[in-house]
Amino acid sequence: MKPDRIRVIAICVFRNGNRILAAEYYDAVTQKLFRRPLGGTVEFGERSEASVIREMREEIDAEITKLRYLGTLENIFVYEGQKGHEIVQVYDARFVEENLYNKEIIQGVEQSAPLRAVWVDWKNPSPDGVPLYPSTLPGLLEKNEDAA
């Protein structure tokens, strides 16, 4: 994350009933866990939908289908003691490999580090005290609930 720069990211929620797939991250400064749907930085010259497809291959070695744009969110936050600012393109899609919906934990890799993704109830995202970001994501999902 570059300071004083707005980063464009694309994430995908993979709705499974009221649950969405979210990776778990740890902030070493606050010593707290948080969750965010899988995805990442949109590279220069890359469309956000292509970014989602690439990130799913890179992070969890998964192919996706029925990619659908849900909306854009703005996320201003502090991570590892540094202020961050993101424009977040939010998508929904389906995994080609349907058995991924039956796994409680999906293991992967992000920037050479282990990645752990879990299913989270987006209508009650933090019963265990672990927040889901962007914090405005549940509102966007609610607006798109009829189209799920």
Image (cartoon, rainbow, N blue to C red):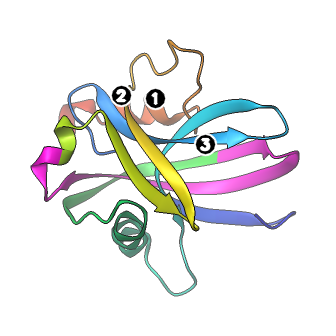
Marks 2,1: beta carbons within 8 A: yes
Quarter of the image with the N terminus is bottom right
Q: Is residue 24 above or below residue 54?
A: above
Task: State which region is magenta.
Answer: 75-99
Quick check: 130 left or right of 11?
right
Q: Is residue 135 above or below residue 70?
A: above
3D distance between C-alphas at marks 3 and 1: 22 Å
Q: Residues within 10 Å of mark 1 (few under 14, many from 20)?
A: few
Q: Residues within 10 Å of mark 3 (few under 14, many from 20)?
A: some
Amino acid type for the residue under numbered disc 3: Tyr
**In this rendering, which labeled residue sits more in front, label 3 or label 1?**
3
Q: Is residue 90 above or below residue 25?
A: below
For label 3, the SS is strand
Q: Quadrant of residue 57?
A: bottom left
**Which residue in the structure is indicated by mark 1?**
139
For label 2, the SS is helix
The answer to whether residue 143 shows anywhere in this view is no
Quick check: 60 left or right of 11?
left
Provide residue 50's location: percent of width, then percent of height: 37, 75
**Which residue in the structure is indicated by mark 3?**
25
Residue in view at x 75 percent, y 42 percent: 77
Provide residue 3's location: percent of width, then percent of height: 86, 63
Amino acid type for the residue under numbered disc 1: Gly
Residue 142 - label: 2
Lower position in the chain sequence, tag 3 or tag 1: 3
For label 1, the SS is helix
3D distance between C-alphas at marks 3 and 2: 24 Å
